Image (cartoon, rainbow, N blue to C red):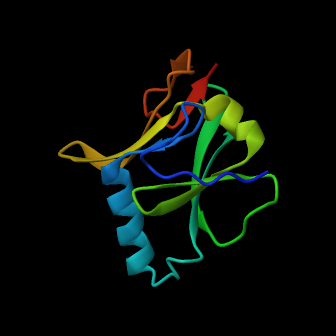
Amino acid sequence: MTTTQTSTDTAQSDVILSESAAREVKKIIAEQELDADKVRLRVGVKGGGCSGFSYILDLTESKKDTDEEFEQHGVKVICDPKSLLYLAGVTVDFKDEIMGRGFVFNNPNATTSCGCGSSFAV
């Protein structure tokens, strides 16, 4: 079942995309000359990394029937049900600081995470 929600009525179980992350995703879509009406941001997890699970961020035009879909700040976000179990309530942010720039996951479900922030354990 697919659900579509806007940034104003996001359920607590969904992945939260910050405004700065949404701006960066839109910028990447424009730079790569992708069709903004068709492309979605896939957020997920996979086994691996130094803490057990690694985060996935990908721009894609393909969507599975089982994917959850919602929209935040004008960006269509999809997540598979298994990943959503680990990412419920996660905020995806974008930081552009002196020490580096990139997407950052703030995961309230993680019991530990690696130093670089790209993997976690629950």
Count of labels shown?
0
Q: Residue furthest front?
A: 9
Q: Quadrant of residue 73?
A: bottom left
Q: Is residue 86 above or below residue 99?
A: above
Q: Residue at x 56, y 21 (%)?
A: 110
Q: Residue furthest top?
A: 111
Q: Residue at x 54, y 77 (%)?
A: 37
Q: Residue furthest left?
A: 98
Question: Is residue 61 left or right of 57 when viewed as pictured?
Answer: right
Residue 18, image x, y percentages: 37, 46
Question: Is residue 114 left or right of 51 when viewed as pictured?
Answer: left
Q: Quadrant of the C terminus?
A: top right
Residue 116, image x, y percentages: 43, 34
Q: Residue at x 47, y 62 (%)?
A: 75
Q: Is residue 44 visible?
A: yes
Foreground pick, 15 / 110: 15
Q: Is residue 111 above or below residue 78?
A: above
Foreground pick, 82 / 37: 37
Foreground pick, 117 / 19: 19
Residue 61, image x, y percentages: 65, 73
Question: Is residue 56 left or right of 27 when viewed as pictured?
Answer: right
Q: Is residue 83 above or below residue 37?
A: above
Q: Is residue 47 visible?
A: no
Residue 82, image x, y percentages: 76, 38
Question: Is residue 58 left or right of 99 when viewed as pictured?
Answer: right
